[in-house]
Amino acid sequence: MGTTLHTLKGPKGATRNRKRIGRGPGSGTGEQSGKGVKGQKARTGHHGARFGFEGGQMPMQRRFPKKGFKNPFREEVFAVNVGALEDRFPAGSVDLAALQAAGMVPRSSKTVKILGEGELTKKLNVKATAFSAAAKEKIEKAGGKAEVVGGKAEAAAG
């Protein structure tokens, strides 16, 4: 008769008897039950300390000096080069919505600065929060227009 699921056995030495602690000196784990001598880990209850706990020593996150500040209200400015505009857009108008639709800036962004890296040959009317001097020059040289809209510039003007 063949082997069936209920008669299967592991290979020799695969299963071991569980360690019976605190059962006398002859067992090898008598007296202190394999917990060593005294100390927090030898006591009953949970000895797993919370994250960062160093046994009462001043923990690292409190020893080190705090440094810096992250302003939650600061807007992140996304940079787009004129060379990228040349690659992605035909001649015409480019604004924040068009840049977001093309995947060049995140949908959540409200501030975009156009930088002068690359060449521009198409006539583009670009609307952005800010322009570098080189970018403005290249856009106007190609016959386009660089118009500042939105962001801090508009808030200061209005």
Image: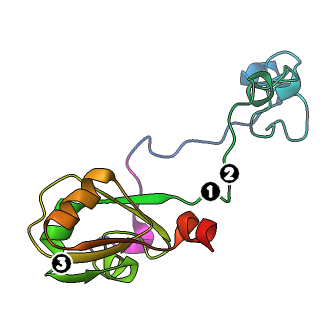
Q: Residue 144: x percent and y percent?
A: 21, 74
Q: Decide: marks 1, 3 in contact (CB < 8 A)?
A: no
Is residue 10 located in the magenta-colored stretch of the structure? yes
Q: Is residue 84 visible?
A: no
Mark 1: few, some, or many residues within 10 Å (few <14, many ≥20)? few
**Drawn side of residue 137 relative to residue 152, left or right:** left
Q: Is disc 2 in contact with disc 1, using a CB cutoff of under 8 Å? A: yes
Residue at 13%, 81% (x, y): give it.
Answer: 90
Magenta residues: mostly which secondary structure?
loop
Marks 1 and 3 sit apart, C-alpha to C-alpha, by 30 Å
Residue 81: x percent and y percent? 25, 58
Relative side of 154 to 117, left or right:
right
* Relative to 18, residue 86 above or below: below
User: What label sits on residue 123 in the rendered view?
Assistant: none
Residue receiving disc 3: 89
Name the mark nearer the viewer: 3 or 2.
Answer: 3
**Which residue is drawn at the image coordinates 46% and 74% (left, top)?**
149
Q: Residues within 10 Å of mark 2 (few under 14, many from 20)?
A: few
Q: Read off the residue under disc 1.
A: 74
Q: Please give left or right for residue 79 compared with residue 42 in the image.
A: left
Callout 1 amino acid = Arg
Snapshot quadrant of residue 18: top right
The part of the image, by quadrant, that contains residue 23 is top right
In the rendered view of the protein, which quadrant contains the C terminus?
A: bottom right
Look at the image and say whether residue 120 sits in the magenta stretch: no
Image x and y of residue 41, in percent: 82, 28
Q: Circle 2 is placed at which residue position?
A: 71
Segment tinted magenta in the rendering: 4-11
